[in-house]
Amino acid sequence: MSSCSYRKNKFPDESAAAINTISVIIDDQLWSGEVGDSIRNKFASPVLGLPQEEPLFSINQYPVKLFEGYSTDSRNIIIIKKDIENKFEIKENEFASPQNAIHISGKTAFEILEILETHTPEIIQKMRTTEITQEQKTFKDSLLNTKKIQKKFGVDLIIPKKYDYVMRRKNFIWLKSEITGGNTSIIIYEIPWKSIRPKYAVKDIIQTRDSIGNRFIHGSDKGTVMVTEEAYSPYFSKINLAGDKTFETKGTWQMKNDFMSGPFINYAIFDKQNKRILVLEGFCYAPSKEKRDLMFELEAIIKSIKIKK
């Protein structure tokens, strides 16, 4: 009892967990049955837009009796157990900071499954927001000077110093970071206000990014340019970014007349005040690596944007 009391009263430790991981605290019997299957299907489902299947979150399972200890410093914890009442609760910074501790209990496995079905979208959104913020914090120890971006586009971005400016044109900037066996890139450009029609958004976004690839993003051999992979339909959604309506598109790119390819994530921001569409895109080339966390870093960089008013 004294140990529990001490734990509650002390300031939560800073979480040092790996990015995009979840600790699931659940007894083996539930984990091996339908409840465990539901958790794996929902939280380890494939990330949209990647060329190979990679899980949305990496999951580590611990029996309830092992809960106290190294599993409690995870940023994301789901605690599931059978109990005399049905309960769903999200507690922030309960055992570490930052942290989301999701408490789910039900009288039967079926009732636990119903709670999971109802609240999974909310849980995933909460966890991804926390992970994006945490990823952005890791950049701040060594930041790139972004005055060139500020001057050209009137925006602030948090970008790690490992990125270099590799191309600057009138309405276009390309930044790249070299990694073992490949690279990650961010491109920024602006297009006229009516360039993307809401009714034909995906078509217009793909045509725009292909025209940008044709103009600026070339391979080492003549005639090799970046285009959108036609074999896979891109994933499209509407979000809000920097206070403006934004179209988010995820898909796969390839180098025409070459063998290079990889994933991309594209954000078309309808900057109403400046009557323009500002496009930020991240893409990577890493044929021998898993790409989930590489693309997550690019997403975190782009989502740090602040448009100067």
Image (cartoon, rainbow, N blue to C red):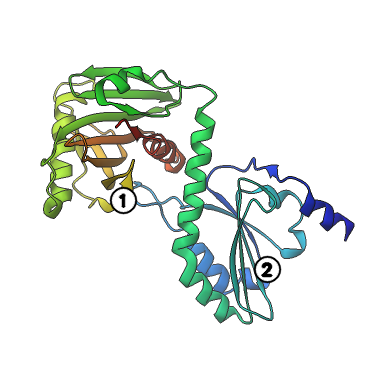
Quarter-of-image position of residue 193: top left
Q: Give the class, few, some or many, for how many residues have Cα within 10 Å of label 2's Cα (few <14, many ≥20).
A: few
Q: Which dot marks residue 28? A: 2
**Depicted 215 relative to depicted 100: above or below:** above
Who is closer to the viewer here, 66 or 272? 272
Residue 142 seen in the current view: yes
Horizontal side of 238 relative to 78 (left or right) equals left
The residue depicted at 46 percent of the width and 40 percent of the height is 293
Amino acid type of disc 1? Ile
Quarter of the figure that contains the N terminus: bottom right
The residue depicted at 17 percent of the width and 31 percent of the height is 212
* CB atoms of marks 1 and 2 within 8 Å: no
Q: State the image coordinates of residue 49 (x, y, percent, origin top left).
A: 33, 48
Indicate which disc, 1 or 2, sits on the residue closer to the N terminus.
2
* Disc 1/disc 2 C-alpha distance (Å): 38 Å
Who is closer to the viewer here, 236 or 275? 275
The residue depicted at 71 percent of the width and 63 percent of the height is 63
Who is closer to the viewer here, 84 or 162? 84
Residue 257 seen in the current view: no
Quarter-of-image position of residue 243: top left
Element under disc 2: helix
Amino acid type of disc 2? Asp
Q: Which dot marks residue 239? A: 1
Horizontal side of 34 relative to 259 (left or right) equals right
Q: State the image coordinates of residue 270 (x, y, percent, origin top left).
A: 22, 42
Q: Give the class, few, some or many, for how many residues have Cα within 10 Å of label 1's Cα (few <14, many ≥20).
A: some
Element under disc 1: strand
**Depicted 247 relative to depicted 286: above or below:** below
Q: Which dot marks residue 157? A: none
Quarter-of-image position of residue 45: bottom left
Q: Nearer the viewer, mark 1 or mark 2?
A: 1
